[in-house]
Structures are given as structure tokens and as C-alpha cells.
Amino acid sequence: MTLVHPTQAVAIFGNFFTISRAVQTVTQTSDACRASYVLNAAALSKPHAVDQLAADLVNYNIDIAVVTETHFKAKHSDSVVSIPGYSLIRRDRVGRRGGGVALYVRSTLQWVVWKHDADDRTYELQWLRIGDTYVGALYHPPRPLYSTDSLLEYVEACVADILRQSSAASVILAGDLNQLSDAAIEEVTGLAQIVNQPTRGPNILDRVFVSRPMFCTVRVLTSVLRSDHKAVVAFAEHQRLAGKIKTVKLHRKVTPAQHAVFRLQHISTIKLNDDEPTDSDTQTQFDAFYEAALDLLNTFYPEREITVTSRDPNYVTAGIKAMLRRKKPSDETRSSRGSRRPGTAHRKSDYKAQ
């Protein structure tokens, strides 16, 4: 008997883990995962975080998003943190603030929540099954209330339970494991870790473990979601990035400061004259007006060239690109902020010039 289900792409961006789609007809025992994407949300409860996540899901054509450290609590209803076109499965942290994991699953996919026989909510681990592929979203905090050995035993029991139920199952375990070593997970589960580039600073905190070779290409990327973690994208087949096509567009920057200069240097000097010229027709008068208006625009609101590439999302216009460039801090600014001694308070004067 055949089923139609996605051959997926699994994504981890720091704490955020997503699976992108490639739908095909397969048997229950055939391969299920084709690619992988990972992201660290660093709190989906912060303003606009869910909207930014939705932008990523649309841009990368994601089927399943696994988010760790969601910071969701009972007050965050599903209707508030849901994304149109996706189902939400969440496992909030119990008894402490922060933490938590969630999965956003495309509404058209057939999926079920899988639970270990001895499910324990002490651990922030949520499992999902699509066909014969089991995906686990795991968050292991820097200061857990449980021992590392107990977590390893629990993960080992989950994987053993999955393989006992389906010996042909493919297993993917992804998320932010912080200081938990790859060797510890690999030793108790037999899974292999495939991320080899840093995802936060010089460290590989966000990882993907697989039960068999699934991916040929693994890349670390940056997401729209504001986070200090980077994304990991893995593909089952070698991906050739299309050549980047650059398009130069013109954009006029408009700011209150420019309005003030325009008022002071031009509007304040205008002298109203009710006399209408009689020596020219309407078209000539309009041409003169258009030339004068264009000259004022070029003087006080000059055009600037903005380069938009084919790799930018569809919603990135020249105006948005210009604002993103102004918002992005320079390398010197980042290094000066990073050089401040830990614990040293920032003064208001530090930001006056920024």
C-alpha cells in the first residue's frame, strides 16, 4: 500500500528546527527526509517573532518547523502564536520560565504526535511522526534541573522504543543541546551528528542527529528571525545555488531631517504670485512645473542606487533593503560593543551618537 507524504527538509536555526518539503509518492518503508533546516528562535513570545518565523517558512517553503526555547506559557494561546497554513504542536516548560519546544506542521501533511511509553515532561523533547520518519525537537538548557545522565537515558529509551515499533524507521533528533557532547548522544542512540560549522559564536550548539546517511550538503545560514544563533540547512542531494542576479533600483530616502531642510531652504523663500503666465500654453506650463518639481526632488531627496539580488525574498523592495542596511550595525560598532567588560553598565551617552 502506498502513501503520499513529504520527503522533507529538516531545518535548525539555533533553537529553531524546520523541515522543508519535497512531496512524492513513496511506500511506508521508503526514505522520508530529503533536506534539513535549523533555527534558534530565542523566544517566539517576543514581539513580531511569530511573523518573522512565518516569513522564513514561506521563503524557504517549509513543511515542518521545530522551534526550541519558545518561552511559551499557558497564557500564550495557540490562536495567538499560530501561523496560517500550519498546525501547532507545543511542549511548554513546566515550573520554570523560558525553554519549551514547538513544531509547526503544514496543514496538508499527515502527521501524528509520537510519545514514549514512559513520557516524562521533565525533559523538553517533543516527537512527531510523518510516515516512517520520526522527528524529535530537543532543548537541553545550560542549567537543567535534571542530570545529564538521566537525559541520555531518556533519549536512548525513546530511540529504542521507536526502532522497536518500526525497525525501518528513520530518526532525526535536532535542537539546541548547549554543552551536551555529540559523543554522548551518538554513544547511547547510534545517531550521527551532521553539523560541522559554528551556529552561535565559535560553538556548534544547534545540531542534527540522523539514524542513517541522509544529507550530502550542510550549510550554515542567517534567518530573518532576530537571534544570536545561525541556521543550518542540509540537503539530501547536492544543491547547486543559482547564480545571483543583481538588479540596481533607484530609491529616494525620505526623513524628517530632509523635510526640515526643504522647508527652511526652499518653502520659506517662496513668494506667492497670483499672476498667471499668458505667453505659453498648458503643456508648456506643465513641463516647466514638472522640471521644477523634479529639480527640487533631486536637490532635497536625491535618488540613490540600491542593489537587490535574486536571493533576496520577494517582499524585499529597494526601500526595505535600504532600511535593513541602515539598521545593520557596522563591524566596528559590533566590536566596540563586544569589547565592553562583562557587567559594565551602558550609559545613555553611549547611544547618543548611534
Image (tube, helix red, strand yellow):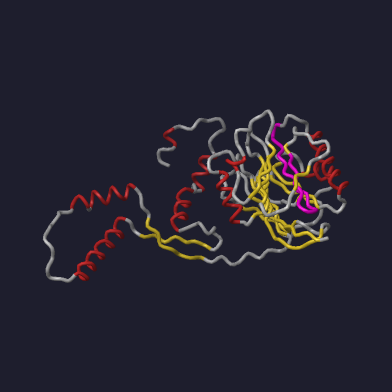
Q: Quadrant of residue 74?
A: top right
Q: Which corner quadrant holds the C terminus?
A: top left
As drawn, which residue projects farthest toward the front? 1
Query: In x, y percent, where is residue 157?
Result: 84, 40
Does the magenta segment cover residue 135? yes
* Horizontal side, residue 321 vs residue 28: left or right: left
Q: Nearer the viewer, residue 174 or 53?
A: 53
Query: In x, y percent, where is residue 188?
Result: 84, 42
Query: Is the residue 342 above or below the residue 225 in the image?
Result: above
Q: Residue at x 65, y 39 (%)?
A: 69
Q: Residue at x 64, y 31 (%)?
A: 97
Does the magenta segment cover residue 27? no
* Horizontal side, residue 93 vs residue 222: left or right: right
**Image label count:** 0
Q: Quadrant of residue 143?
A: top right
Q: Nearer the viewer, residue 62 or 179?
A: 62
Please identify the dominant SS of the magenta region. strand
Query: In x, y percent, where is residue 148?
Result: 78, 34
Q: Residue at x 53, y 40 (%)?
A: 47
Query: In x, y percent, where is residue 119?
Result: 79, 36
Query: Is the residue 320 above or below the residue 122 in the image?
Result: below
Q: Nearer the viewer, residue 148 or 93?
A: 93
What span is colored magenta in the figure? 125-143
Q: Which corner quadrant holds the N terminus?
A: bottom right
Q: Nearer the viewer, residue 166 or 71?
A: 166
